[in-house]
Image (cartoon, grey):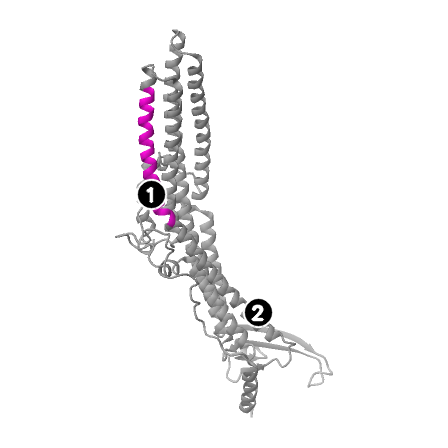
Amino acid sequence: MYRKLLLVIMGLSLCACPRPQQYSAPQPPIPNQWPERVDQAEVPGAPSVVEVGWREFFADARLQSVIEMALENNRDLRMAALNVERVEGFYRIQRAERYPGVNVGTGAQTYRLPEKMSPTGQAQTVEQYDVNLGVVSWELDLFGRVRSLTSAALEEYLATRQAQAATKIALVAAVANSYLALAADREQLELAKATLETQQQSYEMIKRSCEVGIGNDLDLRQAESQVEAARVDIARYTSKVALDENALNLLIGAPVPAHLLPENLASVANLKDVSAGLPSEALLNRPDILLAEHQLKAAYANIDAARANFFPRISLTGGGGIMSSALSDLFKVGSGTWNFVPQLVLPIFDSGAREASYRVAEVNRDFAVAEYERAIQSAFREVSDALALRSKLLEQMNAQESLVHSLRETYRLSEARYNAGIDSYLGVLVAQRSLYAAQQGLVSVNLARLSNLVNLYKVLGGGVD
């Protein structure tokens, strides 16, 4: 009879519950190829980014040591690791609900029976001792509710693992960019000091000429203005170097030893070039996209859990043990006891709560789909931008080097014509300013080129350890 009743209840539940939904990854909303304006997406002979670990990509030994310090001491990465441990604990808690829990307990009680309640008609003191081994209320997961919640918790845990990986890649790139910025500003500072030395020599030479009556005050003041301009740049870049060191120390989580700091960009070993490959290959393995995919899978699992609420919920509680009115008789034959309490619950009327809960789960799924697609589109743009800059920055750097070479020759000729008395000092002044600006521009372009390679490595998802 009970079996027939259960079948009737299950049949009514099946008529009212939604259909099951299977997870399927959305089609990536991006083209199959990089934009046509992107040059050299495939670098001949360059490996894919997934084949290149950060130690191989950043070949400079000092930079590797600084990155290792950051991976050990950075607080953001530490918090990401702790978050993984916390979510793993939540997953284990949820997984434990799939299995029955067993408790053991002992008890003793003493109470007095009044005359009117005593079977002998006289007041008496009753003692009772028991030892029980019981099963905590355990749900028979016939319709997958607990299993779906466990799957959702697992996907959330895997998502936090990917969040940790994304934090690690972002940290490595941030340390590298900060290291390169420090190298560039130190190079700019040395350039400003060298320029000041040259300008000071010119100023002293013109000053001596004026003292013997050969030079003029205009040339002297023009040379003096160049000296002061170089001093301004020295003060500015000295401040920037100090700020760069502070920023690097914050990323590392500890002071960086002086012997690990770069002198200039030339002292940093070249970065390894990588190939972008196809968009689907390059993007779908990024940690942030894998994170969004795990969250999407968790949303599907939550839909299954909401669907299971339309079915009966069956739970079992039971136990067995021994009981006696005397402690000395507790473990003797004939003192055994047991209990078994099955329970079946099916909400009949809940004012639409189950339907609303299921609808919320579906909306969360649709939201997760949009997040997943947006992550892919954002990644596609980031990689496209980095690829578009890669070859152009190299061309710009080559052109800037040619410009520096040309202006250096112009400055040499202008200085020779001034010393020969052919031209005024204005020609030397213009040539000096142009050469100095071009040298500063060369450092900036070189920094932009190296930072672009670091950014490309980051947006492609980084490589293995």
Q: Which residues are magenta?
A: 388-415
SS of the residue at dot 2?
helix
Q: Is residue 414 magenta?
A: yes
Q: Determine whether 368 is above or below 334 in the image.
A: above
The residue shown at (32%, 48%) is 57
Q: Position of residue 319 (x, y in %)?
A: 53, 79
> Which circle marks residue 289 in the picture?
none
Which amino acid, mark 2?
Val
Q: Is residue 282 left or right of residue 115?
A: left
Disc 2 crowd, CA 10 A, few/some/many (<14, 14-19, 20+): some
Q: Is residue 129 magenta?
A: no
- Label 2 or label 1, whichever comes before in sequence order: 2
Q: Determine whether 28 is above or below 452 in the image.
A: below
Residue of label 2:
360
The answer to which of 419 and 317 lies nearer the viewer is 419
Residue of label 1:
394
Q: From where the camera sits, is residue 334 visible?
A: yes
SS of the residue at dot 1?
helix
The answer to which of 320 and 412 lies nearer the viewer is 412
Question: Of discs 2 and 1, which sits in the foreground?
Answer: 1
Q: Residue furthest left?
A: 45
- CA distance separating discs 2 and 1: 51 Å
Where is the N terminus found, in terms of image quarters?
bottom right
Q: Position of residue 176 (x, y in %)?
A: 38, 44
Magenta stretch, main secondary structure class: helix
The residue shown at (43%, 38%) is 255
Q: Residue furthest front?
A: 422
Q: Determine whether 117 is above or below 168 in the image.
A: below
Q: From where the camera sits, is residue 103 visible?
A: no
